[in-house]
Image (spheres, rainbow, N blue to C red):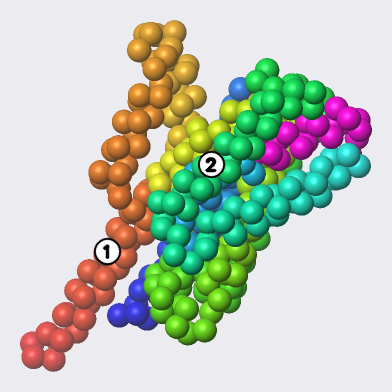
């Protein structure tokens, strides 16, 4: 049964890779035929997808709920803006901002991880700790007006090549592909396998001799750095950063993307980002038809409830489960026909 499941999962992965290859070709030629609005929407989806995948490392593969995940994302956007304003809008400054974002994300992840992953800390307490730490960072950003411009937000210019929307579209697409490959390699590595084992049975993993806290710290470091880089690219794309990017709103958005798309898949984060952002954009465009569509958050809430009720494993998880069931049913029918054949 295990070998059959592995065979089905390999087939599913192959089908996903084929579908993604076709999609990639379509995305490469998309700018030639698209509008400025659609180009911006897809660019946003590419970047948000990386943010969602970074959250899936914690929620989907380790089983940890981080209510302060936006501290990396918003911090990445602020680092970009501050460095651009202080040092200038050049490519070397952009490269420097990548290094600073990585350092910032590592520090935040270590602090968050050390406090949240202490032995005996409940899941609820750990989640509240992450939220509290994110709120501390958000309050610092609000009060440090000389640097962050407080609640008014930080407006900044970016390197000229990155201000070209078509170039940035391709840049964001490459960013998504590279981050997907890196995170996929990480999950399939021995370290990733241990992290999954911790999710399945933490006591058993500890009994086998694995230092649980160290592996959890590795997971939150990878997740945090990925989210921080996504924030850097997002801030560069919008040329703006505000304290909302550090708030629980963006943390719960990341959770929403992964739950709708399917946790523990990486693909799910991408699918969830596409569904939510396209749905949101559609509702915003419908505001001119009826004022009710101005309450687009209500409709997003309905979408979320519908997915939880009818697709508890998310879109990707439900699709995988459906394919597995069909494959098992087909194999059972073939085996039953084979058994009947000799007696006929």
Label 2 Cα neighbours within 10 Å, binned few <14 / some 14-19 / many ≥20: some
Q: Identify the residue shown where x is 39% and y is 70%.
A: 200
Residue that sits furthest to the bottom in the current view: 342
- Label at residue 132: 2
Magenta span dominant secondary structure: helix
**Who's the residue at 51% across and 69% down the image?**
195
Judging depth in this view, the residue of 102 and 13 nearest the camera is 102
Front disc: 1 or 2: 2
Is 86 colored magenta in this rendering? yes
Q: Is residue 180 left or right of residue 335?
A: right
Q: Which residues are magenta?
A: 73-91
Q: Residue at x 53, y 41 (%)?
A: 132
How far across and down, in percent of the image, does residue 184 sit? Answer: 58, 62
Label drawn at residue 53: none
* Label 1 to label 2: alpha-carbon separation: 46 Å
Residue at 37% x, 8% y: name it: 290
Q: Quadrant of the N terminus?
A: bottom left
Res. 326 mark: 1
Mark 1 or mark 2, which has the lower sequence index? 2
Give 139 or 287, whichever is nearer the viewer.
139
């Amino acid at each position: 049964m295990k070998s059959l499941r592995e065979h089905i999962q390999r087939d599913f992965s192959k089908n996903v890779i084929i579908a993604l290859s076709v999609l990639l070709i379509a995305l490469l030629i998309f700018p030639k035929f698209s509008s400025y609005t659609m180009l911006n929407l897809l660019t946003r989806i590419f970047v948000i997808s990386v943010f969602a995948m970074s959250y899936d490392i914690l929620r989907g593969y380790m089983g940890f709920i981080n209510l302060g995940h936006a501290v990396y994302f918003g911090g990445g956007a602020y680092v970009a803006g501050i460095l651009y304003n202080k040092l200038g809008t050049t490519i070397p400054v952009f490269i420097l901002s990548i290094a600073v974002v990585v350092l910032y994300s590592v520090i935040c992840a270590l602090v968050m991880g050390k406090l949240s992953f202490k032995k005996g800390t409940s899941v609820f307490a750990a989640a509240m700790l992450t939220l509290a730490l994110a709120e501390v960072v958000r309050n610092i950003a609000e009060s440090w007006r000389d640097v962050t411009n407080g609640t008014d937000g930080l407006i900044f210019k970016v390197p000229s090549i990155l201000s070209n929307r078509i170039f940035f579209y391709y840049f964001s697409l490459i960013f998504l592909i590279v981050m997907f490959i890196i995170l996929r390699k990480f999950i399939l590595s021995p370290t990733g396998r241990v992290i999954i084992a911790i999710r399945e049975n933490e006591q058993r993993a500890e009994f086998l001799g694995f230092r649980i806290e160290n592996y959890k710290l590795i997971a939150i470091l990878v997740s945090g750095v990925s989210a921080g880089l996504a924030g850097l690219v997002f801030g560069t794309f919008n040329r703006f950063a505000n304290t909302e990017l550090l708030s629980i709103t963006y943390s719960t958005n990341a959770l929403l993307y992964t739950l709708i798309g399917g946790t523990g898949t990486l693909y799910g984060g991408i699918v969830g980002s596409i569904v939510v952002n396209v749905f949101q954009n559609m509702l915003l465009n419908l505001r001119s038809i009826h004022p009710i569509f101005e309450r687009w958050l209500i409709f997003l809430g309905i979408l979320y409830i519908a997915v939880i009720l009818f697709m508890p494993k998310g879109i990707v998880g439900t699709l995988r489960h459906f394919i597995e069931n069909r494959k098992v049913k087909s194999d059972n029918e073939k085996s039953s026909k084979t058994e009947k054949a000799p007696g006929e």
